[in-house]
Image: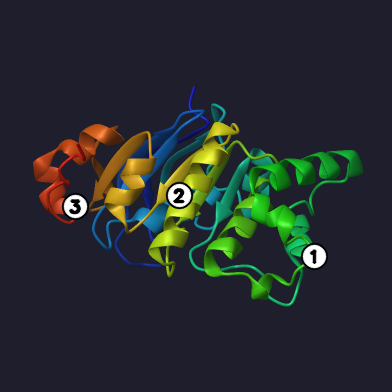
Amino acid sequence: MPELELVDVQAGYGRAAPVLRGLSVAVPAGTIVCLVGPNGAGKSTVLKVASGLLAPRAGKIMVGGVDVAGQGPQRMLANGVAHVLQGHSVFPEMTVAENVLLGAYTLKDKARIADRTDFVKSLFPVVADRWTSLAGLLSGGQQKQVEFARSLMVDPKVVLLDEPSMGLDPKATTTVFEQVVRMRDAGTAVLLVEQNARRALETADIGCVLDLGRVHISGPAAELIADPQLGELYLGGRPAEPRP
């Protein structure tokens, strides 16, 4: 059973035509699922629906086999779905510690908060190293790791990541994707939206190509990267030749 599954979802904004038009996607436990596609395909809208920021017009949002469609963000977080938004969302005048602990605001058990704090510090060493620093003094890539740590404080089943490499230099981008893999390896499934499609698919286990509000094709990420037609259409050209 997938940790998160969207089934035949239709969604949009106001009275405009729907952005998602019967979209279905599943996020199994222990996997990174990456959504790629052209601008306007509905990638970020998928995450908004999955996290409760946008109610679907039709379809099911299944978490652990239970339909939770229409529930708001707070309930979806309680259901085990955390959302790291596009861009930077740290509070720069607060310390790293204060930013991370905001992710535990729904927890009442101090022992559990302490356990989760120890966990995220071990998973993201920069968080432990800069624990008392102002978050605004960190680099963009380090701030993104603080956001990841904050999202994991409630021990979610799935983390939704919207463009985590946005605005980062190549070195920071590499570090961020390495941390995404660490999140998965530590037991959290990931649904990832990323404009850097090829780099994201190199990180993911499963790839889904969106077009016109539906999943156009899905499968093992490595197979999508190797498909020359998909490379031309969606991944910015042909895949690079493997290194000797």
**What mark, if any, has residue 49 been given in the picture?**
none
Q: Which of 155/17 is in front?
A: 155
Q: Secondary structure at mark 1?
A: loop
Q: Is residue 76 left or right of residue 168?
A: right
Report, in whole angstroms, how far the alpha carbon at label 3 lies from the one at label 2. 20 Å
Q: Residue 161 location, x and y as percent? A: 49, 52
Q: Residue furthest right?
A: 110
Q: Residue 29 location, x and y as percent? A: 51, 28
Report, in whole angstroms, how far the alpha carbon at label 2 lies from the one at label 1. 25 Å
Residue drawn 79% across the image and 54% down it: 105
Residue type at mark 1?
Answer: Thr
Circle 2 residue: 177
Residue 114 sits in quarter? top right
Q: Earlier in the sequence, mark 3 or mark 2?
A: 2
Q: Residue 156 location, x and y as percent? A: 64, 40
Q: Is residue 197 left or right of residue 121?
A: left
Circle 3 residue: 234
Q: Residue furthest front?
A: 244
